[in-house]
Image (cartoon, rainbow, N blue to C red):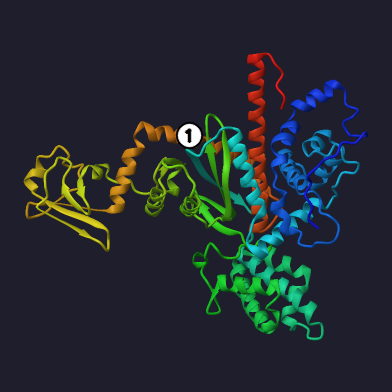
């Protein structure tokens, strides 16, 4: 039964009653006081009411206590068991979550795991990520409290490794067959597996088949395992449609074979099954490195020396930066007119620039990927879809526009071009009849425009501001260990990634409030309350 945690009654035996005056003073200046005053009260418990749809039964553990505990757990890198200990015996944690008046702490060793399970179940059933909604709502409060606007936002992505083991094709096929064979034996005790498939139920056979295979034997064993997988799938039939092991084997065969024959390794898609233990993980090469897992993206609103993460996402690592940019722009309905969204070159595309412009957002890539454009293209005079003049104002003898290829073309007097100071730099090509032809697409023209802008002082300043988001990614990797998340699957990884984002914002808020308080005390000589 859902019940809000509206009051915290003080008792005579309050847990902090025996603190000395000095201890109370230090507690009031610690992170716990800022958390209790500026984060805990703003957790919207009502948002999570759908998790408790029963009108009868035992009331839920206070939502704000559970959400706050999840954030604190990530702030300090505690395990669930360690968090339980701190809930019971750490006065700072109790103060942060306003539990010092509780006779019995409303928390058990399964509280957080049950809450996470309920969140994931709700998302699977409805598609609604309640925790993400709460994290973003808290970020908006932190942004307003710190005086950070949306005039400048910066964006970056981070490759997040799956915890699943990196396995070869032979082990992948064998593991899928092994799992389905075990399930077949469990379901069909009266109909034993054929003798030649029984080997997949013997633990010693896996090591002998995979790890003791000589290099020249791997190919033949792989083809044999694929043939066994096809035979086992046919043997199971439609009666195993609800079996996860059957679904994984079927997916593996779709990925690895075509027409019953093994595909060449280079023909296997990056979205193929990488390991049955983490079906959502995908494969990607980036910057010369191989990655198996996911990719996280964050958007940070930045002000004067401070930034708050106001949007985030986690997808399979085949999700490109351009797709992330499109997603962010589509969600930026309330963005300030003329606001800047700073990113690196991988986020830029013609469609993203156009969509951002429609919403009065200045998409600012600090560099551009791919082949550089001729920067002189932007100096051509264009009216509508026609070139009406070269950089020096000479009119063409003919001009046209191909709508299908979005190509502008113009012909100029070759004698004029021969004496032009831009001869050799200009994209005009001399023809045998003495004329010169210029041809370029809308995309090339726009790229030339962007590259010209990148050289301006305004864009250089944007590039310097974007560097700050790299520090956030470094913190997520070093302090919050996004590459060592103890979960498998996209939804579970996304849930934990969101809690880590909330922890980053909480630490940012607390540190900046403490800094402002110290500066005020130094200037006025007065002790400022948290």
Which residue position is annotated with label 1?
465
* Rendered view: 16 above or below 433: above
Residue 306 in the image: state x and y as whole percent. Answer: 56, 32
Q: Which quadrant does the N terminus fall into?
A: bottom right
**Of the pair 150 and 77, the residue shown nearer to us:** 150
Give above or below for 237 relative to 517: below
> x%, y% of residue 352?
41, 52
Give the image quarter of residue 148. Answer: top right
The reply to whether residue 165 is in sight is: no
- As drawn, 277 above or below 13: below
In the image as oriented, which residue stretches furthest toward the bottom? 191
**Can see residue 446?**
yes
Crowding at mark 1 (Cα within 10 Å: few <14, some 14-19, many 20+): some
Residue 237: x, y in percent? 67, 84
Say which residue appears at 72% left-offset and 18% top-offset. 527
337 or 484, which is in the foreground?
337
Is residue 163 found left or right of 307 in the rendered image?
right
Q: Residue at x 56, y 79 (%)?
A: 260
Question: x%, y% of residue 449?
Answer: 30, 43
Q: Which element is circle 1 on?
A: helix
Quarter of the C terminus within the rendering: top right
Front one among 529 and 68: 529
Question: At 79% from the left edge and 24% from the top edge, which residue is drawn?
Answer: 26
Q: Is residue 197 left or right of residue 148?
A: right
- Quick one: which residue is furthest to the right in this view? 13
């Amino acid at each position: 039964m859902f019940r809000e945690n509206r009051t915290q009654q003080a008792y005579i035996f309050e847990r902090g009653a025996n603190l000395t005056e000095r201890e109370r003073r230090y507690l009031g200046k610690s992170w716990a006081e800022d958390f209790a005053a500026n984060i805990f009260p703003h957790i919207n418990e009502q948002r999570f009411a759908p998790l408790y749809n029963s009108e009868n039964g035992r009331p839920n553990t206070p939502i704000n206590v559970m959400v706050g505990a999840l954030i604190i757990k990530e702030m300090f890198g505690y395990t669930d068991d360690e968090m339980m200990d701190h809930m019971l015996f750490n006065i700072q944690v109790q103060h942060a979550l306003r539990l010092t008046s509780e006779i019995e702490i409303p928390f058990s060793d399964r509280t957080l795991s049950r809450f996470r399970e309920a969140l994931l179940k709700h998302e699977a059933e409805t598609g609604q990520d309640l925790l993400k909604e709460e994290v973003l709502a808290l970020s908006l409060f932190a942004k307003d409290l710190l005086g950070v606007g949306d005039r400048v936002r910066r964006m970056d992505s981070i490759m997040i490794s799956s915890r699943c083991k990196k396995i070869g094709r032979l082990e992948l096929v064998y593991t899928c067959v092994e799992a389905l064979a075990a399930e077949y034996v469990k379901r069909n005790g009266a109909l034993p597996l054929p003798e030649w498939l029984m080997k997949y139920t013997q633990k010693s056979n896996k090591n002998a088949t995979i790890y003791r295979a000589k290099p020249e034997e791997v190919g033949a064993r792989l083809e044999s395992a694929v043939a066994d997988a096809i035979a086992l799938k046919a043997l199971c039939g439609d009666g195993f449609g609800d079996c996860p092991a059957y679904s994984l084997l079927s997916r593996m065969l779709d990925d690895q074979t075509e027409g019953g024959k093994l595909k060449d390794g280079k023909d296997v898609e990056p979205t193929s099954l990488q390991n049955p233990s983490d079906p959502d993980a995908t494969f990607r090469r980036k910057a010369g490195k191989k990655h198996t897992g996911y990719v996280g993206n964050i958007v940070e609103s930045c002000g004067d020396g401070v930034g708050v993460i106001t949007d985030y996402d986690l997808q399979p690592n085949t999700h490109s930066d351009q797709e992330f940019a499109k997603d962010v722009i589509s969600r930026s309905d309330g963005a300030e007119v003329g606001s800047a969204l700073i990113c690196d070159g991988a986020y830029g595309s013609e469609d993203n620039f156009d969509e951002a412009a429609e919403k009065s957002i200045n998409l600012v890539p600090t560099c551009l990927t791919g082949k550089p454009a001729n920067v002189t293209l932007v100096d051509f005079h264009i009216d509508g879809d026609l070139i009406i003049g070269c950089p020096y104002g000479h009119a063409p003898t003919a001009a046209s526009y191909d709508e299908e290829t979005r190509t502008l073309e113009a012909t100029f007097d070759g004698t004029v071009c021969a004496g032009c100071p831009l001869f050799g730099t200009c994209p005009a090509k001399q023809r045998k009849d003495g004329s010169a032809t210029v041809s370029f697409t809308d995309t090339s023209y726009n790229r030339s425009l962007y590259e010209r802008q990148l050289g301006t002082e305004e864009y250089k300043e944007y590039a310097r501001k974007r560097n700050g988001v790299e520090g956030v990614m470094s913190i997520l990797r070093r302090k919050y260990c996004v590459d060592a998340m103890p979960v498998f699957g996209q939804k579970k990884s996304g849930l934990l990634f969101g809690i880590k984002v909330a922890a980053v914002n909480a630490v940012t808020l607390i540190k900046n409030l403490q800094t402002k308080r110290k500066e005020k005390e130094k200037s006025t000589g007065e002790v400022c309350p948290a």
